[in-house]
Image (tube, helix red, strand yellow):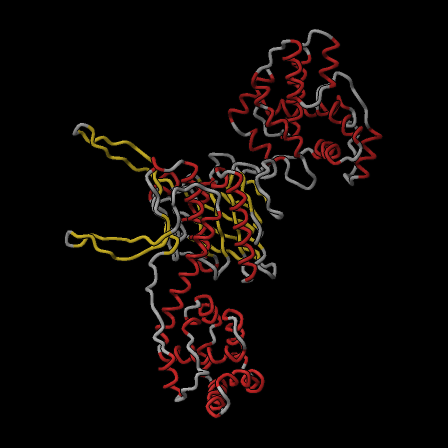
Amino acid sequence: MKQIKSISIENVKGISKEKFDLFLAPNMPNFLVAPNGFGKSSFATGLNSLNRDRLKLSDENYHEKISTNDPMIEFEVVNNDNSVSSLIATKDQNDIKKVFDVFVINNQLKPDANYRNIHGKPITSPSLEVADIYIFEDIPEKVSFNYTVTAFRNTIADTKRIWFDITDYLDNQLLITKLSELDIIEKCKLKKEKSQIERFINIVKSLNVTTENILSEINSTHINIIDSEHLNSILDVIEKYGRCSRGEALIIAIQIECLYNADKEQFIKIVKYYKYCIATKNAIGIFKSFQTKWKGIEPKEINIYKKKNGKRELVKKHFGIQFPRATDISNGERDVVSFVAMLLKARYQFGRKPFLLVIDEVFDYLDDANLLAVQFYINQFIEYYKGKSLAFFPIILTHLNPHYFKNYFFSNQKVHYLNKWKGSVNRKIENIVISRNNTLDSSYADNISGYFLHYNPKNIDLKTEMENEFTAQSLGALNHTLHKSYDFITECNTSLENYVKGKRNYDPLAVCISLRIKMEKYVYGRLSSSILQNEFIQTKMTVNKLNFARDNDNVEIPEVFYLLGTLHNEILHIRRNHDNSSPIYLKLNNSTIRKMIKEVTK
């Protein structure tokens, strides 16, 4: 599987009908960026509602809460041969689950109520709680091997001490689990394997050397009779995880095979319990690695009781996290604990099919240390699935653009904008900004910044310099007029005017440039002397210019000028071969920001 080309969703919460052309890449983090209110949670809710057989929404998650609005989710998948497959889930079917495992990590807070009795009166106060999170449900029964070395010796009719007690090896959970994963113990019953085991047992019976020398003779002379691929695979595992010689491994293998044949069902139960023990130890270790002060909160076995005949009766056990009351843990700690628990649940729940892991804005609330730890474990997920030759798609829903917020350290990641800019892009303007951002000539960069991207009453013509930079950076042909700063700014102003009038034919980057220049021009015109104006022009960065005017000439700076800094600073992030317009559009499309910009342009 090469990628998920698109995901279409219909009639889920706030989404009526949307097709997201994503081209999600496997085995790397995929960030899906969209503003608050766009529908990221609706996207996550739809995927979280995929059960084994169908797409099952709760009543409140139907679009417009009308249950006759039939929901649908469709994946378009690009296969290894470049063919495209369509997988559809509806209220009656689920083709997606036949191919993918899907797991969603989202905010686990649920409304609850605290009840108190004050002066004999019941008082109720609302609170937000987190329900217990079960990493493993229905803990398997603890079962032990029915083994004694005496019983084994009696089985083969040989009391030599070379048939040593293997209890320690049977207690080695990793060894027994690895053997079961080979799925070849059953093959020891095959004619070739059975014959070689019987031959070896007979050789040992015939040896007349002392017990101390038998193992040496087995390793030097008789181990070579085992040429079965299946038996040698078993010996390899026992040698590695049992830390023993080849001859000892064979002694152990024969006894384990005997136990397996005597009670296969018990052997399978033991393996299931061992896998549970290994996983829980690992889960606790991962949990403790996060930097926290969680007041003793960690994964543990949780008893589940049910009332029967007026009494509480233990019905099952789970392994997971029990949360204290909201008053006993901070909001930040609660969010991190629930996220880690859900991450662990995802880690141990799947592993046989391509896996879609959706993280719904949880990243936006983690502190730096825990954010770094989470990224480490997502990378471990990626390596785990690579080792199984399975596609793993970690999808992180966020309103924070990873290109700007330097909290994400993945070496290989893709950023997708759900609410993409669908208008035209003025490549002429964009390429001039890119040439400035990528140039090695500081003088050229200063001239583009000073005359094209900031206010300057002088006009400058950089035709020759721009042509040289465009050639050096392979940016194509230079526009025949935009090498003049006045013409460049005039074209940007047109975009700003169209944006303010509510028209769609504007360029987001040009709006940012024009907005910055208009604010600086406004402040420049209020400085009381030409000397101050010249110093203002020479000052770098808009915020420094505003502060200069305020501190040196008591110019009253509208607060909106500072607030809009996050918008016009988008210019700094313009990159080649990148969707530069969508992240700006996400901000320009906000009604409050539109109102702020209209205020500036009055």
Q: Look at the picture and state if 358 lies above or below 231.
A: above
Q: Is residue 157 above or below residue 28?
A: below
Image quarter hosting the N terminus: bottom right
* Residue depicted at 49% across the width and 92% down the height: 208
Identity of the residue drawn at 66% across and 9% down: 553
**490, above or below 278, in the image:** above
- 35 and 134: which is toward the camera: 134
Q: Is residue 178 visible?
A: yes
Asked which quadrant contains residue 60, the reply is top left
Residue 172 found in image quarter: bottom left
Image coordinates of residue 540 in percent, x first then y, are: 71, 22
Say if residue 47 shows up in the picture.
Answer: no
Q: Nearer the viewer, residue 82 or 307?
A: 307
Residue 180 position (above or below residue 61): below
Q: Is residue 214 left or right of residue 561?
A: left
**Direction from residue 128 to residue 89 in the image, left or right:** right
Front residue (pair 166, 523):
166
Q: Check the image and name the residue furthest to the right.
A: 464
Residue 61 place in picture, x, y as percent? 37, 42
Left or right of residue 599, residue 257 in this image? left
Q: How far across and how far down the image is residue 147, in percent?
A: 36, 76
> Residue 519 appears in which quarter of the rendering?
top right
Please identify the quadrant where the C terminus is shown: top right
> Tag count in the figure?
0
Q: Residue furthest left?
A: 309
